[in-house]
């Protein structure tokens, strides 16, 4: 609780505030307002962390760090026909281009890479990350829209791994992809974003989707350096704590006490 005494000075530069400025605790200086953004963010994170520690079983607090993840708050609804059609048109184009590339005998083109926020390829394989992803539910998936991040190079890679797909032809591969479109999907998210996550098998996904490690997951990797470390992982939407679990490298304990062994992600 900020006392009325503290409110008389700007919380960034300590200049005396007018009566109106005191309501916000900050002066009108542009520089103060710029510096205040990370300051307010840090205050919010501390507040959320305190709330998380109050909410979880006491034993969790003994030695565990806290990792904050985003939360996918999209509602489930039938995949709309216009979005399905946009994807179909886009997919047919990249599949056709990939088959043309394959005919030339050239190696698959370089695919677009995604941010990994400082994690190594080995760290990215940490199986618990898949479960942490599930706790969020795919906040990042909405960037997939009606392209699912698929590009010609993605299809070229799929063809290079599957001579059978080359044999069957472009129309068959297009149909294969479309067969994974869910009937119920997350509103406004990627067309493949179903109730339980991505509906596409991992090998058919774009490199961007397979590679991306969000800030929260990278933070979790750093907080689980060895088999004895544990972290309270919470997915948070604005200021609201949506889901919480205690994670080690090999086990997950849900808030209701259910113990899950970490499975290999796919
Ligand atoms: Zn100021």
Image: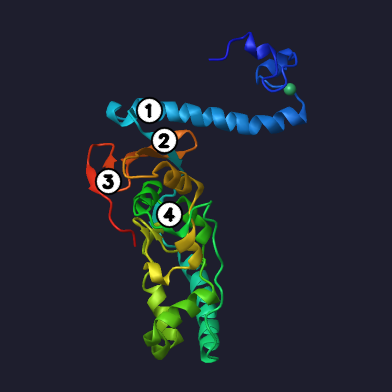
Work out whether residue 220 or residue 242 is closer to the camera in this orientation and state it: 220
Residue under numbered circle 2: 66
Which quarter of the image is occupied by the C terminus? bottom left
What's the residue at 40%, 79% (across, down)?
175
Residue at image position (28%, 51%) is 262
Q: CA distance from mark 2 to mark 4?
A: 19 Å
Q: Position of residue 181 (x, y in %)?
A: 39, 68
**Residue that mark 4 sits on:** 123
Secondary element type, mark 2:
strand
Occupied quadrant, residue 9: top right
CB within 8 Å, label 1 to label 2 = yes
Ligand 1's quadrant is: top right
Left/right of residue 100 with respect to residue 32 in the rendered view: left
Does any atom of ligand 1 lie closer than 8 Å to the CB of label 2?
A: no
At mark 3, the secondary structure is strand
Q: Which residue is under mark 3? A: 251
> Measured along the vertical axis of the image, is residue 76 above or below residue 257?
below
Crowd band around label 1 with a 10 angstrom C-alpha radius: few (<14), some (14–19), many (20+) = some
User: Which residue is the site of mark 1?
Assistant: 53
* Mark with earlier residue (4, 3): 4
Please say if 13 is above or below 248.
Answer: above
Residue 220 at x, y = what percent? 43, 44
- The Cα–Cα distance between marks 3 and 2, rounded to whole angstroms, is 16 Å
Q: Are marks 1 and 4 in contact (CB under 8 Å)?
A: no
Helix or strand or loop: what does disc 4 sit on? Answer: helix
Answer whether labels 2 and 4 touch (C-beta < 8 Å): no
98 vs 246: above or below: below
Instruction: Tell us which disc is closer to us: 1 or 3.
Output: 3
Marks 1/3: CA–CA distance: 20 Å
Tell me the distance, in whole angstroms, between the alpha carbons under discs 4 and 3. Answer: 17 Å
Asked if the residue at tag 3 contacts the one at tag 4, i.e. Cβ–Cβ closer than 8 Å, the answer is no
């Amino acid at each position: 609780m900020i006392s009325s005494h503290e409110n008389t000075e700007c919380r960034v530069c300590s200049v005396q505030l007018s009566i109106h400025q005191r309501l916000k605790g900050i002066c009108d200086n542009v520089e103060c307002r710029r510096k205040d953004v990370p300051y307010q963010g840090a205050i919010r994170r501390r507040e959320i962390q305190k709330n998380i520690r109050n909410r979880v079983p006491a034993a969790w607090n003994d030695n565990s760090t806290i990792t904050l993840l985003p939360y996918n708050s999209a509602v489930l609804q039938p995949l709309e026909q216009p979005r399905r059609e946009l994807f179909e048109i886009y997919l047919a184009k990249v599949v056709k281009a990939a088959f043309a590339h394959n005919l030339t005998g050239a190696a698959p083109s370089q695919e677009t890479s995604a941010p990994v926020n400082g994690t190594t390829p080995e760290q990215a394989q940490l199986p618990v990350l898949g479960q942490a992803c599930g706790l969020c539910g795919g906040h990042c998936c909405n960037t997939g829209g009606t392209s699912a991040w698929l590009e010609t190079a993605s299809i070229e890679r799929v063809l290079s791994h599957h001579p059978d797909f080359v044999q069957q032809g472009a129309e068959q591969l297009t149909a294969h992809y479309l067969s994974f479109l869910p009937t119920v999907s997350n509103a406004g998210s990627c067309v493949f974003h179903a109730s339980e996550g991505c509906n596409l098998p991992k090998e058919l996904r774009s490199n961007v989707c397979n590679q991306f490690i969000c800030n929260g997951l990278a933070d979790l990797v750093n907080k689980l350096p060895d088999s004895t470390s544990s972290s309270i992982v919470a997915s948070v939407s604005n200021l609201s704590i949506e889901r919480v679990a205690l994670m080690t490298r090999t086990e997950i304990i849900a808030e209701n006490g259910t113990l899950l062994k970490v499975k290999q992600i796919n």
